[in-house]
Amino acid sequence: MSGNDREAAVRRLLERAQRPLPPEIHPEAVRRGTRMLRRRALARRTLWLLLSAAAVAFTVWALTARPWVEPPSHTTPPLTGW
């Protein structure tokens, strides 16, 4: 099928009369779409909450553990009796 044939076939499909939809499809689609949007919003809020909790936990850990400070050397004995 060449490009012109495909285009003609698509035009024929689009120009055909549309079949009527059953009346119960629209409310069902709205109900499912609303539920899907609520689930996405809940998932987004949950992910933001987890990200915030992880950031707070990391900050608290960093402030208490102070990983940027070099640990004291334990190989040299302390100087006493000077």
Image (tube, rainbow, N blue to C red):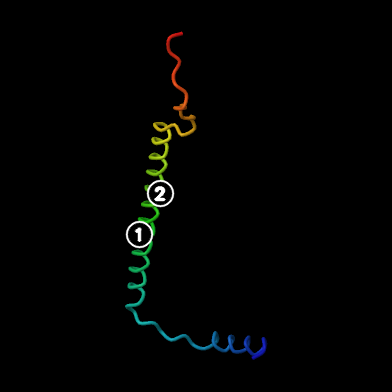
The location of residue 57, given as percent across then percent down, is: 38, 40
Helix, strand or loop at label 1? It is helix
In the image shown, does 65 or 75 lie closer to the viewer? Answer: 75
Q: Residue at x 39, y 39 (%)?
A: 56
Quarter of the image for the N terminus: give it.
Answer: bottom right
Identify the residue at horizontal 47%, vertical 85% (top origin).
Answer: 18
Circle 2 Cα neighbour tier, 10 Å, few/some/many (<14 / 14–19 / ≥20): few
- Indicate the position of residue 6 as horizontal and vertical percent values: 62, 87
Q: CA distance from mark 1 to mark 2?
A: 15 Å
On screen, residue 40 above or below 31: above
From the viewer's side, name the closer residue of 11 and 42: 42
Contact, CB < 8 Å: mark 1 with mark 2? no
Q: Nearer the viewer, mark 1 or mark 2?
A: 2
Residue 52: % across, % down: 40, 44
| Marking on residue 38 | 1
Residue 48 shows which numbered tag?
2
Please give the name of the residue rendered at 39% of the width and 82% of the height, measured from the top-left corner: 21
Looking at the image, residue 45 sits to the left or right of residue 73; the answer is left
Kind of residue sitting beneath label 2: Trp
Going by the image, does 62 lie left or right of 23? right
Compared to residue 19, the image places residue 66 above or below, namely above
Neighbor class of circle 1 (other Cα within 10 Å; few <14, some 14-19, many 20+) is few
Q: Which image quarter: residue 27?
A: bottom left
Check disc 1 and give the amino acid type.
Arg
